[in-house]
Amino acid sequence: MRRQLLLGAAGLLAGCSVLPDRPYIETLRFPLNPERPPGPAGRRARAVLLVRMMRAAPGQDQRGLRSIRRDGTEAVSFFAEWVAPPAEAAEDALRRWLAASLRFVAVVAPGTRAPIDLVLETELTTLVADLRTNEARAGLSAVLLRDGTLSTGVVLQRAITGRAPLSGDQPGQMAAAMVAALGAALGELEAAIAPYA
């Protein structure tokens, strides 16, 4: 009898769940792909530019959208993220942006056998939607080196911050503003390295 009671109680417990029922939340994914606005480069291309792998500053390697709440605390979303790691996507966007500028004979990646004139090293330092100021920011640190047969030297070092207005606190609005902020940063970086092309 005692054994039957224990088996019955075990059967009842098996049908119970200690976790509350929660609705399924679909993860939203956004591409980090700013497009360069059309326009002439204004200068004849002479140099081949190598764009090295973009590094990610601490905290910038997560796919979740980053925001600063109105109380000043930082949040990383678990249900809204970039399609690819931000630094990886920003590197691809940078390469496409500079190729579309027509300021260089070619914009190439590591492993190329093309003769290199300039090397661009970058780091993604910031990519955030700031709800306190209603703006998104994208920060880049860049070093441009001249790659010669006899010597290699730094010709430019720059910290750049692109900004874009933030229209709301929904994931789509935050992602769109951060994409626009990255586009602003890439435009500023293009203008900075243009004289060396």
Image: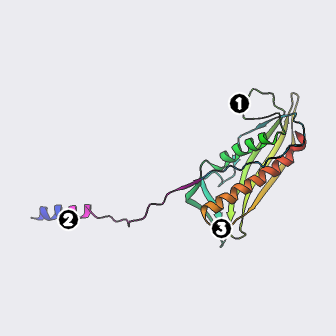
Residue 182 within the segment the image draws in magenta? no
Residue at 81 percent across and 31 percent down: it is 116
| Quarter of the view holding residue 131 | bottom right
Indicate the quadrant where residue 44 lies: top right
Q: Which mark is residue 168?
A: 3
Is 184 placed above or below 115 here?
A: below
Marks 1 and 3 sit apart, C-alpha to C-alpha, by 42 Å
Front of the two marks 1 and 2: 1
Mark 1 or mark 3: which is in front? 3
Labels 3 & 2 near each other (Cβ < 8 A): no
User: Pointer 1: what residue?
Assistant: 111
Q: Give the magenta-colored segment's residue range.
A: 10-29
58 or 180, nearer to the observer: 180
Please tell me which residue lies in front, 61 or 21.
21
Amino acid type at image mark 1: Gly
Residue 124 visible in rendering? yes
| Image coordinates for residue 68, horizontal then vertical, percent | 66, 66
Instruction: Please check the rendered image and state whether residue 17 is part of the magenta-colored stretch, yes or no.
Output: yes
Disc 3 marks which amino acid?
Gly
Q: Are marks 1 and 2 in contact (CB under 8 Å)?
A: no
In-image side of 163 versus 41 (left or right): left
Residue 42 picture location, percent across and down: 89, 43
> What residue did someone put label 2 on?
9
The quarter holding residue 71 reads bottom right
Display colour scheme: rainbow
Q: Position of residue 16 (x, y in %)?
A: 29, 64
The numbered mark, 1 or 2, whose residue comes first in the sequence reads 2
Which is more foreground, mark 3 or mark 2?
3
